[in-house]
Image (cartoon, coloured by chain):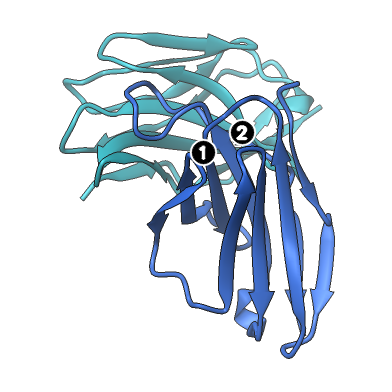
Amino acid sequence: DTEVTQTPKHLVMGMTNKKSLKCEQHMGHRAMYWYKQKAKKPPELMFVYSYEKLSINESVPSRFSPECPNSSLLNLHLHALQPEDSALYLCASSQEWLAGGYNEQFFGPGTRLTVL
Amino acid sequence: GDSVTQMEGPVTLSEEAFLTINCTYTATGYPSLFWYVQYPGEGLQLLLKATKADDKGSNKGFEATYRKETTSFHLEKGSVQVSDSAVYFCALSDLRAGGFKTIFGAGTRLFVKA
């Protein structure tokens, strides 16, 4: 299984809502990532988890809260978002993060988020 | 800091034409280099990779060679198909702060006409 799955595919939420994005992989990867991608732009790294520990937070606002309950799952909890947070949110995984190697990442299809 | 620069698109080609998408990078260390492809409505897929100087990555008729002397990793394909229409991202992965960070170029949109 070389797939990263993400749910939901689409999400529309108001600025006062609380919602969560979910990501799952069963490749035994120990590094997982959240990216934000605006239209016609490259992905921007938000968070890196390595061995279920948060390793990188790219100065992301606290209204985005990541969680890694186990080595296969990654969540992104959303609260009090702004319309400018509307984007495609991509999850990715790779074998390792701290070890050497070429760090090939496997991406999920993304969640298209719209904040009204 | 590290960065990736790739040619602006969109690039429009006829089927069976030759494709080149230029990519250059700056990095302080010895990065690994990648090309990812994103089809409409989907996430990114790894197209090919190279981990050291003079390595050639290849997949599905696409090729790119890691050129350290020119800090380049240009993507080429001899004969494009309509199904190759997508956005192509050049990327590097380099060691920073105890771990690896992947930096993407801006992306080049390719349209292939039948």
Please state the horizontal and vertical placement of residue B29, each as a whole percent of the image. 18, 32
Instruction: Tell me: residue A4, above or below residue A82.
Output: above
Specify the subunit that label 2 lies on: B
Q: Earlier in the sequence, mark 1 or mark 2?
A: 2
Circle 2 SS class? strand
Tell me where residue A57 sits by quadrant.
Answer: bottom left
> Which tint was used for chain A?
blue
Instruction: Tell me: residue A68, above or below residue B99.
Output: below
Please state the horizontal and vertical placement of residue B13, each as a whole percent of the image. 65, 30
Q: Which residue is mark 2?
A: B37
Specify the subunit that label 1 lies on: B
Question: Which residue sits at x=83%, y=74%?
Answer: A12
How many angstroms separate mark 1 from mark 2 (CA)? 6 Å
Q: Which residue is mark 1?
A: B89
Residue that sits furthest to the front in the current view = A70
Amino acid found under the numbered disc labelled 1: Phe
Circle 1 SS class? strand
Q: Residues within 10 Å of mark 1 (few under 14, many from 20)?
A: many
- Tell me if residue A110 can be seen: no
Tell me where residue B86 sits by quadrant.
Answer: top right
Please state the horizontal and vertical placement of residue B19, each as a whole percent of the image. 55, 23
Q: Are marks 1 and 2 in contact (CB under 8 Å)?
A: yes
Q: Residues within 10 Å of mark 2 (few under 14, many from 20)?
A: many
Instruction: Tell me: residue A112, above or below residue B48.
Output: below
> Which tint was used for chain B?
cyan
Question: Which residue sits at x=51%, y=26%?
Answer: A95
Residue B99 or residue B54, whichever sits in front: B99
Which of the image's four quarters has the C terminus of chain B?
top right
Residue B14 or residue B100, whichever sits in front: B100
